Every structure is written in C-alpha cells, then in structure tokens.
Image (tube, grey):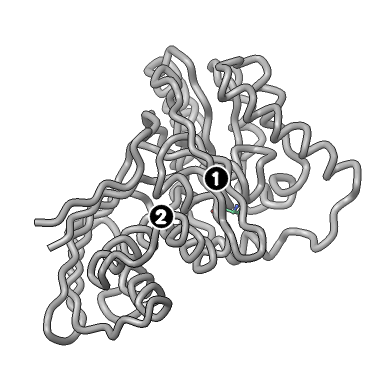
Amino acid sequence: MIRLRVPASSANMGAGFDTLGIALGLYNRMEIEEISAGVEIINQNTQSFVPRDKNNLIYRAMLYLFDNVGYRPRGYRIIQNSRIPMTRGLGSSSACIIGGMLAANIISGRTLSYSEIIHLASKMEGHPDNVGPALYGGFCVSLTDRNETIVKSTKINENIKFAVIIPDFFVATKKSRGVLPSKVNFCDAVYNIGHASMFQAAMLSGDMRALRLGVNDRLHQQYRKNYVEGMEDIFEKTYLLGSNATYLSGSGPTILSVLSGNYERFRRGMSEYFREESLRWKCMILPIDNVGAVVSIQ
Ligand code: HSE
C-alpha cells in the first residue's frame, strides 16, 4: 500500500497569475493500492463530497500517468481523508492530481522523474502554480513552456504564516477563469511583471514593506471580485489588522493574508468583523509547508 500526504496550496499570490504559489500546512492524506479489478473509493472525511467512481480525480490522475507510460491499469482501492476545502481556491484538485500521479508512478515501476510528473500534472490541471507547491512544498515559482514545466521552490521562514479566509460559498475555477479577458492592456502587463517580481524578491528577502506593494495585481482580481461579495471590504479589514499582503487565493473565493506576527489577534479580529457584518466566513491561520508531498510504501 502507498501512503501519501499532499499539502494544500495558494496560487497567484496577487500579481503572479498562473506562476507564484505557496504550500500550506493543511493536507489531503491518501492510501492507494492495486487490487485485482474495479475501483473502490473510500472517503474518510464526511465533511467533503468526493466522487466514488471512475470520476474520482485521484483515480483519473493515476490513469493519466498510466496512459503516458504505457502501463495497463488493474483495479484500485483509494482511501482519502482530505482537510482541504474543495472549490475554494486552496489547491484541492492539485493535491489529488499529485497524490494520484505519485502513486501511479510507483505502481507502474517509477519510470518518471519529478520533473516529468510535474509537467504531466500541470497539463492535467491546466496551470502549474498549484501542482508545483503540492509536489515540492515551499514558495514556488512555476512555469510551463512548450514541453517543459519548471518549478523553483524555496523554503520560507516559518515566522511567516498565512491567514486563510474562507467563505461559505464556492466558485468553480472554470467559471472564474471564464470571466478573464482574452487580451490585456500593455501597461497592465508591465505593471504585473514588476509587481510579481517584487513579490518574489520580498518573499525571499523577508521585506514585508515591498511585499505590500508587490501583491497588487491588474490582471485577474478586478474581474473576479464580482463573484466574491464583500472582497474589497475584507481586503481593507485585513490591512487594518496587520496583514502584510492580501490577495484572492487562486481563482478564489478564499482570500489569503500573509502575516509576520500577531496571528491570533488577526484571527480574532477577522472573526469579530464577520460576526458584526453577519458574514459566514471563517479565518484559519496556517503555517507554510516547506516539505511538499510525502510518500511511503507499507
Ligand atoms: N492560476 C489559477 C487561476 C489558479 O487563477 O485561475 C486556479 O486555482
């Protein structure tokens, strides 16, 4: 049996659309084994819905890899226990894809390297910024160019924590990508190159003042805010409570704030704000995951 633990992730991080991402200390734990025939899916977390047939994403990711390496699939038993909220912009699908592909790689004889797996995972997901951190952990810069996906992962000081602000509604990534324009203004593109680069430099050097500016984006958040009622007010509140940088996590609707201290005060402040405004959002403080996917064979 193969045991896996794959972290949640938060992509874009403001201006780094489809490029920047971070792994978070919240996990999808899976146990996968080959059986003679059929698909058996056991979901141990009753809070979340997961397909228990061939539509299961972990299973589909396994088939994707098998097909690529020419392995003839047999039957599979997949047990999953995921704490990552689904369709909230926290990389739940990427965690399933990475888990399924890592297991399938072992079952089929470990023919693919991590660089090859990440490329397949990025192709299946459609962008590399969640699968990168899910596999490698840390703060990741990822890109796919023609037939290659490159991920550069850096461990980040654990004093930096992430306030994950999750609403009680969800937005599918497909819908949230559908509202984006097919062309962008040249000045906006230049703006985002500068800001994403500065965000990266600030994360690596720990310069929180530069992070505050570097997080600003002109490529996607302005189009997506219509799906996230109250987004601008929540952003403002996070800065009043000491956030260093606040952005829409992935395609939303979760909002994420980067904190360098006063974590509990921030969490309590946000919870109070939601109570006063009668909003059904919740705020969790998560550490970075600097390890990435962990695999063991029993
Ligand atoms: N970069 C992707 C997007 C992340 O913004 O659509 C999806 O989680």
Q: Quadrant of residue 290?
A: top left
Query: From the viewer's perspective, is residue 218 above or below residue 38?
Result: above
Q: Which mark is residue 83?
A: none
Q: Is residue 195 above or below residue 167?
A: above
Q: Upstream in the sequence, badge 1 or badge 2?
A: 1
Q: Residue furthest right?
A: 186
| Residue 53 spot, x, y in % from top left | 27, 80
Q: Amino acid at mark 1?
A: Ala
What percent of the width, then of the height, locates residue 246? 59, 30
Cα separation, mark 1 vs mark 2, equals 20 Å
Q: Amino acid at mark 2?
A: Tyr
Contact? badges 1 and 2 (CB < 8 Å): no
Residue bearing mark 1:
11
Question: Does 223 sit above or below residue 35?
Answer: above
What residue lies at 37% left-to-right and 18% top-to-bottom?
A: 264
Residue found at x 38% / y 70%: 61
**Mark 1 crowd level (few <14, some 14–19, many ≥20, 10 Å Cα):** many
Q: Tell me if I can see residue 286 in this picture.
A: yes
* Quarter of the N terminus within the rendering: bottom left
**Residue highlighted by disc 2:** 114
- Image quadrant for the C terminus? bottom left
Q: Looking at this rendering, what residue extends furthest in the left direction?
A: 298
13 and 283: which is toward the camera: 13
Residue 242 image-quadrant placement: top right
Residue situated in front as seen by the camera: 163 or 202:
202
Q: Is mark 1 within 8 Å of ligand 1?
A: yes
Disc 1 secondary structure class: strand
Foreground mark, 1 or 2?
A: 2
> Image point 62% across, 57% down: which residue?
144
Look at the numbered disc 2 and give the secondary structure of its residue.
helix
Q: Give left or right: position of 181 versus 152.
A: right
